[in-house]
Image (cartoon, rainbow, N blue to C red):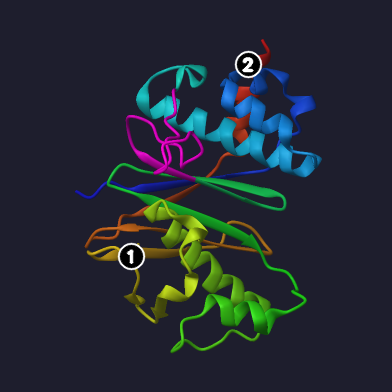
């Protein structure tokens, strides 16, 4: 049986309201948290990283603070995609929502975006779309394409360092993928709708798409905050 993919959604958490949650982060995470100038960025970062600690700790049967992440980039520095000795995971956030995807069957990428008006939608759409794709002319269509492609690129570990236009999407998913970072085998892609006004997608590799389960992470995150503050 192919391992399932689980996705949790939660609201941002203001660090000043959750000092116990901040204490669960490691030195790297706390330093990164402190560098954010905007309150919203700090709240999204804390919620996402606290939630992934809660989810992984439950799966790996350890304390959330005991998790050790490897952030080694291809260049050798500690600013790459974090990993643990266990299932792959992906973090995302937009406006008032954060998400965590965990998949035990291989790499996974998750992206969420708030559907909103854009000053230069045609220009952005041309940047995102492959030459043979229909250029989206409305925000919802644009962000559906964006979330699908960013989820795919995050699954590779390259993220937006790879051009979105290297991926051509069709009715049944990925029609073609060119360039050095393109996977050699099949990929799977699933659209998500986590909340009103948001679009999301989760993606990974393999011939058999996993069953995707979505969860409300707010209750679990509040419980983690309460335990950490006791």
Q: Is residue 10 magenta?
A: no
Identify the mark nearer the N-term, 1 or 2: 1
Magenta segment, principal secondary structure? loop
Task: Give the magenta range.
Answer: 68-90
Q: Is residue 36 left or right of residue 168?
A: right
* Residue found farthest to the left: 1
What residue is shown at x 34% (from left), y 74% (from top)?
A: 178
The quarter of the image holding the C terminus is top right
For this rendering, which residue is in front, 92 or 82? 82
Q: Find numbered disc 1 in the image and state the secondary structure of the residue it sits on.
A: loop
What residue is shown at x 56% (from left), y 34% (from top)?
A: 51
Place of residue 15 in the rendered image (x, y in percent of width and height, measured from the top left): 74, 28
Q: Find numbered disc 2 in the image and state the secondary structure of the residue it sits on.
A: helix
What residue is shown at x 48% (from left), y 33% (from top)?
A: 78
Q: Is residue 158 above or below residue 12?
A: below
Q: Is residue 91 visible?
A: yes
Neighbor class of circle 1 (other Cα within 10 Å; few <14, some 14-19, many 20+) is: few
For mark 1, what is the residue? 180
For mark 2, what is the residue? 228
Q: Is residue 115 above or below residue 8?
A: below
Place of residue 57 in the rendered image (x, y in percent of width and height, measured from the top left): 44, 25
Place of residue 56 in the rendered image (x, y in percent of width and height, measured from the top left): 43, 30
Place of residue 207 in the rendered image (x, y in percent of width and height, measured from the top left): 22, 63
């Amino acid at each position: 049986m192919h391992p399932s993919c689980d996705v949790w959604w939660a609201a941002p958490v203001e660090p000043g309201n959750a000092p116990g949650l901040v204490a669960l982060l490691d030195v790297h995470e706390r330093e990164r948290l402190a560098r954010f100038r905007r309150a919203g960025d700090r709240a999204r970062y804390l919620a996402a990283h606290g939630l992934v600690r809660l989810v992984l700790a439950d799966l790996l049967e350890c304390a959330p603070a005991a998790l050790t992440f490897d952030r080694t980039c291809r260049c050798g520095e500690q600013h790459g995609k974090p990993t643990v000795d266990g299932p792959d995971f992906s973090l995302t956030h937009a406006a008032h929502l954060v998400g965590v995807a965990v998949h035990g069957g291989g790499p996974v990428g998750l992206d969420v975006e708030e559907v909103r008006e854009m000053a230069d939608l045609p220009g952005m759409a041309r940047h995102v779309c492959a030459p043979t794709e229909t250029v989206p002319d409305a925000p919802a269509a644009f962000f559906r394409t964006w979330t699908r492609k960013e989820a795919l690129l995050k699954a590779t570990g390259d993220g937006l360092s790879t051009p979105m236009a290297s991926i051509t999407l069709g009715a049944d998913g990925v029609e073609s993928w060119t360039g050095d970072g393109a996977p050699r085998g099949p990929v799977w892609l699933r659209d998500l709708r986590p909340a009103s006004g948001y679009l999301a997608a989760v993606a990974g590799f393999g011939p058999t798409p996993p069953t995707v389960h979505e969860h409300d992470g707010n209750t679990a995150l509040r419980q983690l905050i309460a335990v950490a503050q006791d």
